[in-house]
Amino acid sequence: MRLAVYPGSFDPVTNGHIDTLQKTSKIFDKIIVAVVHNITKEALFTLDERVNLLKESTRHLENIEVECFNGLLADYLVEKRACAIIRGLRTVTDFDYEMHMALMNKKLLPNVDTIFVMSDTNYIFVSSSAIKEAALMGGDVSSLVPPVVDASLKEKLAQMQDIR
Ligand code: COA
């Protein structure tokens, strides 16, 4: 079975991520979306919330599973018997960071390759941080995220307004 892992912080999942999954779900038999706690990023959504948002947003794709993981990606790939890592590329600015990460993972796990998927031009400027910033200031991001994410961002905004 050709199993690939799509790792990331997904805080929250955007239509850019869903586009990547729609494309790669046709190539692999199964994809595990692995939600990672990235210590360098302050998260808006808990890991459980991010997993649930991803599950809701990928219901239309049969061969996708969502999990969270801690630790080294290479160890997780071995545990899952994955043959590939999926990563999205938006612009050339992503390339340097992604290349270093892909080469490190290749060194740790020579049998596993990173597969890069070019972002749809509609989502080239989209990042989870930009979505959060715009949404929490009342901006309309409904065309850039799945409906369930849009609703959850509105809930977070309402909670923040209640606290103030
Ligand atoms: N559409 C929209 N946004 C996209 C996108 C696309 N197609 N592709 C990437 N992005 C955005 C994400 O929204 C995210 O935005 P943000 O920075 O505003 O949150 C950003 O690009 C990239 O983040 P992400 O994909 O979540 O990766 P990351 O850099 O946070 O983490 C891991 C990368 C999780 C894969 C890496 O840290 C990891 O493997 N960690 C485990 C520990 C380990 O093994 N480390 C050694 C690795 S060599």
Image: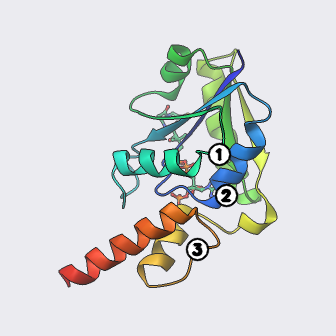
Q: Secondary structure at mark 1?
A: loop
What separation in Å lies between label 3 and label 2 (alpha carbons)? 13 Å
Q: Where is residue 102 shown, x and y percent of the image?
A: 66, 34
Mark 3 is surrounded, within 10 Å at the Cα level, by few (under 14), some (14 to 19) or many (20 or more) other residues, namely some
Q: Residue at x 73, y 45 (%)?
A: 22
Please report contact status of discs 2 and 1: CB closer than 8 Å, yes or no: no
Q: CA distance from mark 1 to mark 3?
A: 19 Å
Q: Amino acid at mark 2?
A: Gly
Q: Is mark 1 within 8 Å of ligand 1?
A: no
Circles 3 and 2: CB atoms closer than 8 Å: no
Q: Is residue 148 visible?
A: yes
Point out residue 81 in the picture as x, y percentages from the top left corner. Answer: 59, 14
| Residue at image point 63% right, 69% down | 144
- Which label lies toward us, 1 or 3? 1
* Residue that mark 3 sits on: 142
Q: Quadrant of the N terminus?
A: top right
Give the spatial CA distance, label 2 vs label 1. 16 Å
Which residue is at the front of the view, 56 or 153? 56
Residue wearing tag 2: 16
**Location of residue 27 with respect to 60 vertically, above or below:** above
For discs 3 and 2, the disc positioned in front in the rendered view = 3
* Disc 2 within 8 angstroms of ligand 1 (CB): yes
Q: Which mark is residue 60?
A: 1
Q: Amino acid at mark 1?
A: His
Res. 146 image quadrant: bottom right
Secondary element type, mark 2: helix
Q: Is residue 153 left or right of residue 123?
A: left
Q: Kindly report which numbered mark, 2 or 1, lies closer to the viewer in this rendering.
A: 1
